[in-house]
Each structure stands twice: as structure tokens, then as C-alpha cells.
Amino acid sequence: MSETYPKLSNVKSIFPLDSISEEQEYLIILKNERKFKISSTLYTIIQYMDGTKSVNEIVDNVNEHYFLNISEEDVMRVIREYLVPNGILNDEEYEEKSSMNCKLVVSHKICSSLNKLFSIFFSKTLLFIITGATLFTHMIFYYHFFTLKANLVEISGFIYLKIYFLHLVSIFFHELGHSSACHYYNVNYGDIGVRFHHTIPYFMVNVDDSWILKRTDRVFVDAGGIYFQSIVSAFLIFLHVLNCEDFLMYGVFAINMNMLNNLLPYLRSDGYWILSDIFGIPNLSTRWKSHSVNTPQYRYSSNAKKKIFCVRLFFSLVFIFYHLGFLYAVIVLIPRFVTTFLEILDVSIHGILSGITGGNLLLGIEKSLQLLCPVLIVLRIIISLMGIICQIKVIILICFKKLLNYIEKIKKYL
């Protein structure tokens, strides 16, 4: 049988991960930008995979220098079941799975100039002043905003286009916030580009190298996008005060809704990474599952497991109150929503049919856009109700599991 000489040719970088784990963990970043968290034992093994040592030699080196007791079969199983399937030992088979394939929308030179310019916003003095100013601005804005009564019938389809344009501008600055934070902390970052996910375009920037930072610094990179979006939102509030354009007011509300969605720690959002870095819990969603279903526990201290439990419970409660707040906003801002929705439905359908039969294409497009917002609000209401029900179920499950654990501990003492 021929000897195997494994080589990590697909690995871009490996560095220690700052987390609350009792055992030192490491992060592998591949050339196609895929990321994997590994244990110190696996790190010990793969650091000898340079293509010059056979599996047998790797086993001898690990056992001799690190006083471990692994076998050749152990290493082969790691290669066969983990390293090869995840593309860590293969540079071609998994290249197409890159999560960062995107088309650049801003040149590298312009990105670097913008990041150099805006990175000063992360200095402690400016950060404190700007954050306080934007919070105060938004408090005044919403004090007046919730005294209004929105009439969706009076909002034309082209106003929705203006609102969407403002939303796209804020998303661009969101990504600029992440990369500017990286520039401030002197770590590498990618250019701002557009990626298509299920035919839906969205801005993105590669900030994987921020993993080398301490957890406290990574939080600022995580929150940099929302920080810049809040600045854009405050600037739009200022413009609205100057000229009283309604689309600016609704644009601010749309941007802030996006910011709140991003703060919710689910689906790898900014809030997910912020929460993960604050508490030092990598793969947060996987850890959560261990508190709601029967999955293997990770190697964390009892104190760390309590922290994971509290974070999971906190997230569920925040999620519930967030969606209750959205439902409240719909009730307050859009009185008689059902009646309004039916009225818009009637007006839009007649407008679309008139535009088609009369050859007025712009009228048909405008009425189609006018119908889009109420439909999205109805879908959002359904999603909010389903989300609230799911999170209540999760709270019951994790609390019940915690109660069972306490009962078992009490039984041991009796």
C-alpha cells in the first residue's frame, strides 16, 4: 500500500480563536473563503501536513512532541471524514463553493480611499459623539413619527422606488462601515461588491481577517455596518427637517427596520456575530441547538454553558418583543389596515388593467409598485406571528430542559 503525504494546499490561514472554550480553538480560512473552527488536537495534527511527512510520521511527531496517543487510523479518519469532504485537502473540487463570489461595484482604489476617510469615525471620541448624536436624532424623529397616521393609498408606486433607492444607499454604507472598521484596526478586507443569492442582489464585503482581532475589537467590526447605517439615517432625518419630503421620512423608517432586522442574532446577521463575539461563543446557532434538542454538549465549563443558556433565552425574548413592536407599529401607523389593504387592492388592480388596456405602461407599473408594499406588510405580519409562536416554543423547551437538569441534580443529592 502506498504512503499518504497529506498537504494543506487549500488553506489560506490558521490562527487562534478568542472564545470562552476551556480548550484553545483555532479558525481555518480556505482560499475560497470557507471557514472552519477546529480543536487544538486537530490543529496539532494538521500543522504537520506540509506534503513532506507521511501519515505515520505525522502520528509519531504528534505523539512524541505533544504527549498524545493517536493512531494512524485516527489521522486517516480525520482526513477521510473531515478534511477532504470540507475541501481542506483539495484545492479544486470545492473552489466553486466560494461564499465570496461577487461582482465589484466600487474599484479597490476608491474603496481604500473611502475606508481611509471614514475609519476615523471609529476613534473613541468621535464614536461616542456620533453615537450619542444619532440616538438623540432618532429619539426626536420617532417622537413625532408615531403621532402620524400613514395612508398607504396616498403613497404612489414611484415613491416606493425612491424609498428603495435610499435603502440601497444605506446598504452600501453598511458594508463600508464593516470595511472601515477593519481599516481602523489594521486588518485586511475585501472590496465592496454585489453577490446574487437566489437571483436577489445584495452588497457584501469580505472581512474574514477580522477573526485575528480580540473579541472586543471584533464587536466594533461586527457593528460597523449598523453604525454607518444609523449615520445615513440621521442625515436623512436632517434633510427631511429641511424640505419635509415624505419619502425621506418613510426611507428613514425602512432603513431603521433593516437595521433592527440585522441586529436580531439569527441567520448569520450582524447581531448574530455581535452576540457571538461579546460572549465568546463561536458557532452560536449550533450551541443553541444543544439547549433545545438532544444534541452532544460542547467542551465548555458549567459557567460557560449557563452563559449560552442565558444568551439563548435573551435572544428569544428580544425576538418576541421585536415582532410585537412591529405589529404594534402597524396598528398605530396604519389605522384600519385591513380596510386600507382592500382599498389599495381594488385601486391597484383597476389601475393595472387600465394601464394594460389603455397602453399606459407607466400607470400599470406604478400601480403594481403601489400594491407591492401592502402585500409585503401582510407577509411580514404572518412571519412575525409565526416567529413569535416558534420562539415561545423554544423558551418552553429550553426552560423545561433546564428544569429537568435541576431535578436530576437534586435526585443525586437525595
Image (cartoon, rainbow, N blue to C red):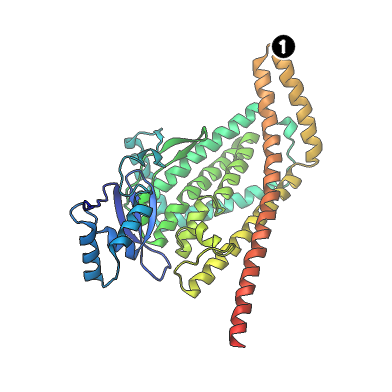
Residue that badge 1 annotates: 358
User: How many numbered marks appear?
Assistant: 1
The image shows residue 80 at horizontal and vertical percentages of 35, 53
Location of residue 115 (image quadrant): top left
Q: Give the farthest residue toward the bottom.
A: 414
The answer to which of 225 and 215 lies nearer the viewer is: 215
Residue 19 in which image quadrant: bottom left
Quarter of the image with the C terminus in it = bottom right
Considering every residue shown, the one lying at the far left of the view is 52
Q: Is residue 310 visible?
A: yes
Q: Is residue 212 visible?
A: no
- Label 1: element kind: helix
Q: Amino acid at mark 1?
A: Gly
Decide: is 165 above or below 42: above
> In the image, residue 366 lies at what x, y percent?
66, 23
Q: Residue at x 53, y 66 (%)?
A: 308
Q: Is residue 38 left or right of residue 381?
A: left
Q: Residue at x 65, y 57 (%)?
A: 391
| Picture quadrant of residue 53 | bottom left
Task: Judge the density around disc 1: few (<14), some (14-19), many (≥20) Cα neighbours within 10 Å.
Answer: few
Q: Residue at x 64, y 30 (%)?
A: 159
**Foreground: 317 or 99?**
99
Residue 11: % across, % down: 29, 49
| Direction from residue 279 to residue 257 in the image, left or right | right
